[in-house]
Each structure stands twice: as C-alpha cells, then as structure tokens.
Image (spheres, grey):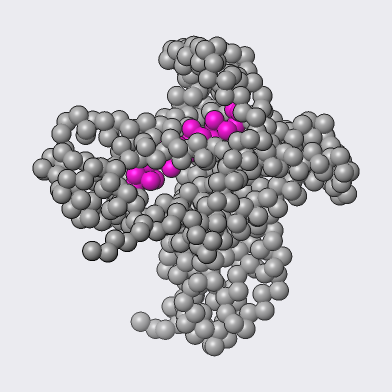
Amino acid sequence: MPLTTRTPLADPAWTGRVFWSLTALVVLWPLLVLAEFKPWVLFSPESLKPTLRFLGDFVPPKVEPQFLLLVARETWRTVAMATAGIALAIVFGIPLALVSVRSLSQSALRGRMDRLPAVVRLMVRWVLIVLRSVPELIWALVFVRVVGLGPTAGVFAIALTYTGMLGKVYGDILESSDVQPTQALLRNGSGRLQAFAYALLPQSAAELTSYTVYRWECAIRSSAVLGFVGAGGLGQLMDGSMKMFSGSEVSTILLVFVALVAFADQVSAWLRKALA
Amino acid sequence: MTRQLPPALFSARCRACWLMLAMLVLVVASFYSLELQWAKFLSMEALGKMGRFVAELLHPSLEPAFLRKLGFATLETLAMSAVGTLLACIAGFLLALPAARTHAADRARGRGAARMLLNALRSIPELVWAALLLISAGLGPLAGTLALALHTTGVLGRLMAESLENTAEAPAFALRLRGAGPVQVLLYATLPQVLPQLLSYTLYRWENNIRAAAVLGVVGAGGLGEMLAFHLGLFQMPQTSSVLLAMLVLVALVDGLSSWSRRVMAR
C-alpha cells in the first residue's frame, strides 16, 4: 500500500462520536422542552429590568442595627432549630436503631432468627426508610398546617426526617462492626443492652459521633431553608424580604447565610477531628 | 484483690468531655430559646387534626385527568433534574479547570477566585437559588432548572477540581515535556484518567437532584413540588395525597435504582 493514500490525522472513533452526539441531542431535546428551558426569557426586557433593580439594590447590604439584631436572632433560631431537631432525632433514632440491629438478636445465636423478631426488625427498618425518604420540607409544610407558623413545625420536621437518617445509618454502622465480641457476651448470658454497651459501642463510637456531627451540619443547612414554608429562622426572614423586593435585606441575609454555612462546616470538621 | 474504680464521668483534662458538655449546653439553650409549642403539637386538637390529615391522605385522587397531570409533573421533575445536572456538569468542569493546580509549575492564577465562586455557589441551597431566580425567570420549571444547575455547579466544580488535582502526574508530564499545549495535555493525559470519576460524581448528583427537584416546586419553581404546594394550599386532600405518593414513589425508585446499580457495579 503506498503511503501517500493514508490520511494520518483521521480519528478512528469518528463515526462513534458523531453517533453518540446525535443520540444525546435526540434524548436531550424533549427534556429541554419539558423543562421549558428558554434561557432567553432571562434577558427579555420585562424580566431584565426588575432583576437589575433587585440586584442593584444588593450592593450596600442593609446594616441598620435594628435589622442586624433581627438577623442575629433568626440566625440563632436557625441553629437552635437544627440542634433541637437533631437532639430529638438522636433520642428517637438510637432506640429504633438498636431494635433493628440483627447482631443483637438472641434467637439468632441458635442459628436462624425467630419469626417475630425478624418481622419486627424488618418493620422498624421500613419505618426508618420511609421517615428518611420524605424530605423535611414536606414534613414542615404539613406541620405548619397543624401547629401554625413558627419554629415548632421546623423542629419536628427535622426531627422526623433525621430520625430516619440517623436510625438507619446507626443501624448500618453497628451491623458492619465485628460480631464476635457481641456474640461472646450474649452467649455468656449478658443482656442485649450490655452487649451493645460493652461490645458494639466501643467499636463504632467514633464513627457514630462523626456521622452525627456531620448530620448536624446538614440540619443547619436545611433548617435555614425550612423557613421558606413558614417554619421560622433565616429562611422565613429571607422569604419576607424577597416578597418585598428588598435587595439590600436579601443581600445581608445571604451573606450571613453563607457565613453560617461556612462556620458550621468548619466547626463540624474540627469537632469530628477532636472527637475521633 | 484490687478493685479498679470506674473511670470518672467527667475530668477537667478530657477534651471530649468538655466538648460533650458544650454540646449539651447548646442543646439545652436551643430548646429553651425556641419556646416550642409541645402542648399545642401534642394536644388532642392537633393530634386529631393530624389523624384527620393522615386519614384523608389515605384516599388519593385517581381521576384519569388528574393522573395525567401528575405524570406530566413527574416527567417535568425528571427533566428539570436532568437538564440542571447536565448544565452543572458542563459549567462545573469549566470552573474546575482554573480551580485546579495540576502541576507544580502551574501558576493557577484564577485558582482563588474560581474556588471562591464555587464555594459561594455551593453554600446557597437550591431552594434559595430558586426563590431568587423567580424574579428573573418567573414561575415555572426554568427557575428550578437553573437553581439546580447553579448549586450543583458549585458542588461538582469542587469535586472535579479535587479529582483533577489528584491525577497521576506522569502522563501529563511526559506530554508537556514533548511540547504539548495545555489543551492537548488535558485531552490526552488528564481527562482519560478522571473521566470515569467525573461521570460517577455527575450521576450521584443527578440522583440527589431528582430528590431536590421534587421539593423545589414549593416556592413555585415547577415540577411535583409546585403541584403539592398548590393543592395543599387549597386543602384539596385527595389530590395532595396523590402528589405526595408520586413523590415518595419517585424517591424510592431513584433510591432503589441507585443502590441496585451500585451493587451491580461493585460485583
């Protein structure tokens, strides 16, 4: 074969690339239509003008002492909602996790677990999964109808969702640890709580605390958002300012919010290191 | 026989003890300052209301016309999450390039600025972005899509920058030594190494975004959440219940699919 007929720069995967790009476009098109993806709407004059006005208002953030005091109070409330919610979630999550852990079963020592304990463990696990899979925002939306506006709805919303999360993950962590010590204790006649305290807990205490602290950080982020459905905290303040188109207030709140998230991030990283 | 005393519950030298004490104080202060309405939450009236609410939720609306609307909203939610993630994948990658210092001689001038931008994008949740974007994008799925895209850009950009920085340097070095430009080095040395990881990050965020897109609508940004807020606001319980069920099924499906695929991949 003469060398001159070869085209040295041809891409051997060329046809495949074209095919997959075209397929991606064909799949993407209906998605773009469904999501009403028309970014040029952003630049139409009727939306550009209020946006620019709103953004222009951002620049000196509002720093009146009275407003700052309000922001500080709501910030504390956001943290407090997250903390109280997580505390409740720990209180409910630990017993549920303990019930669901298979390695603490006494009947399983003989071989197969009895029917009733197996069913109870499965049920508890399902309850935890359901609790976890309903987002806290939905719980908050529901609770606001029942108890009215305010932090109560937020705290219980966080408590429910995080009970599911903590309970399930606590259970997973405890089950993934070594079963030998637990079984040794159980076989020698210790109770299940004793086996938990002296065999399971020492193995996984560090992991459990670090996961809890991480979830506390997540709860702070979500409690700030819960305010948008009326559950108190920074979100509610921001919702109010947004409805009044007050850019300077929104920018103050956003700055505080970013600072709060960064602070929680740092504290949680530090705590996890200190407790490990 | 010597008996050891159990260790003291609190010792002034134990750092973890002080931390636990501080956390306990924080918890007590939180409960004290929030003035929770336990009585109201656990009162017969509230419990009755909850009971009635749950009872009403057990009768979802199954009218064909409504179900069609619900199916459409579900598709809209999926489309929002997919388009948002795709945009974020592209934007995140473009921002990750300046945010990563890939070799020692790389001056990476824009690194600080790009990292700051990514952090800012990431630390504002999707819902807040959606509420902010309502002003310029109006009610509807566009605001939700862009909100997802903005937040996810921050998350993905950071992860991508990290994995770009952690690639093995030898292939890039070999190419650079032979005079390849930065684009060629990226395409032929760095990208082939990190592509699977970037893809898995993106898929993982897509999974998160489906869940987020379902609730994003409560501020008016389209999808299932918008339907939920609408029907709950009008106290139309059968419809609300159907929407909630659809959300739960969607989230459960995504959860199941992801854990199944992870098991299959790990095998």
Q: B37 or B248, which lies in front?
A: B37
Q: Is residue B132 above or below residue B261?
A: above
Q: A23 or A90, which lies in front?
A: A90
Q: Which residue is farthest front?
A: B1
Left or right: residue A224 versus residue B260 is right
Q: Position of residue A258 (x, y in %)?
A: 70, 51
- For the record, the magenta segment spans A152-172
Task: Verify whether residue A205 appears in magenta.
Answer: no
Q: Position of residue A44 (x, y in %)?
A: 79, 38
Q: A4 or A218, which lies in front?
A: A218
Magenta-drawn stretch, dominant element (helix, strand or loop): helix
Tell me, yes or no, if residue A50 can be seen here. no
Q: Position of residue A92 (x, y in %)?
A: 43, 35
Residue B89, image quadrant: bottom right
Q: Residue at x 66, y 47 (%)?
A: B124
Q: Position of residue B234 (x, y in %)?
A: 62, 14
Q: Residue at x 87, y 44 (%)?
A: A65
Tell me, yes or no, if residue B110 can be seen here. yes
Q: Which residue is farthest left?
A: A110
Task: Verify whether residue A159 appears in magenta.
Answer: yes
Q: Residue at x 54, y 88 (%)?
A: B177
